[in-house]
Image: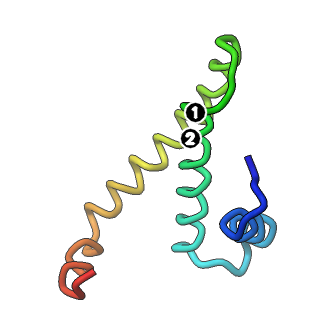
Amino acid sequence: MWRNDSMDSDVQNILLNPQNVDIKRKVEVVLKISYRFRDNLYHGNKEYDEINSYSTCFKKINEFVKLLLQDIENSDYLNDMTMRGD
């Protein structure tokens, strides 16, 4: 899962030292891990029997993304981005 590039070292550093990391960076890390997991699930080498081992992680990732999207929808985050021109 971990490749030797800057994204992975950033993720690894945050996972090893989460105490001094703000929530925005933690969310970014979870999304990066989720993306890599999804990429491995769909494009990686796997046997049919191994697919069940992905089930629990995939469910947790989907639940996290669902909650994140609900939080964004319930906040002024999208309005703030529109006002700033993001």
The answer to whether 61 appears left or right of 72 in the picture is: right
The percent position of residue 85, horizontal first and vertical second, equals: 22, 84
The residue under label 1 is which amino acid type?
Answer: His
Residue sitting nearer the eye, 37 or 72: 37
Packing grade of label 1 (10 A; few <14, some 14-19, many >=20) is: few
Residue under label 1, please give it: 43
**Total residue callouts:** 2
Task: Please tell me whether residue 31 is drawn above or below residue 18 in the rendered image.
Answer: above
Packing grade of label 2 (10 A; few <14, some 14-19, many >=20) is: few
The percent position of residue 20, horizontal first and vertical second, equals: 71, 81
The answer to whether 1 appears left or right of 36 in the picture is: right
Task: Please tell me whether residue 26 is drawn above or below residue 46 in the rendered image.
Answer: below
Residue located at (29% from left, 74% from top): 77
Residue 73 figure quarter: bottom left
Q: Secondary structure at mark 1?
A: helix
Between marks 2 and 1, how big is the CA–CA gap? Answer: 6 Å
Residue located at (52% from left, 73% from top): 24
The colouring scheme, among rainbow, by chain, secondary structure or one colour, is: rainbow
Residue located at (53% from left, 56% from top): 31
Name the quadrant of the C terminus.
bottom left
Q: Secondary structure at mark 2?
A: helix
Task: Please tell me whether residue 69 is drawn above or below residue 85 in the rendered image.
Answer: above
Residue located at (64% from left, 18% from top): 52
Q: Are marks 2 and 1 in contact (CB under 8 Å)?
A: yes
Residue sitting nearer the eye, 23 or 49: 49
Residue under label 2, please give it: 39
Task: Please tell me whether residue 23 is drawn above or below residue 62 in the rendered image.
Answer: below
The residue under label 2 is which amino acid type?
Answer: Asp
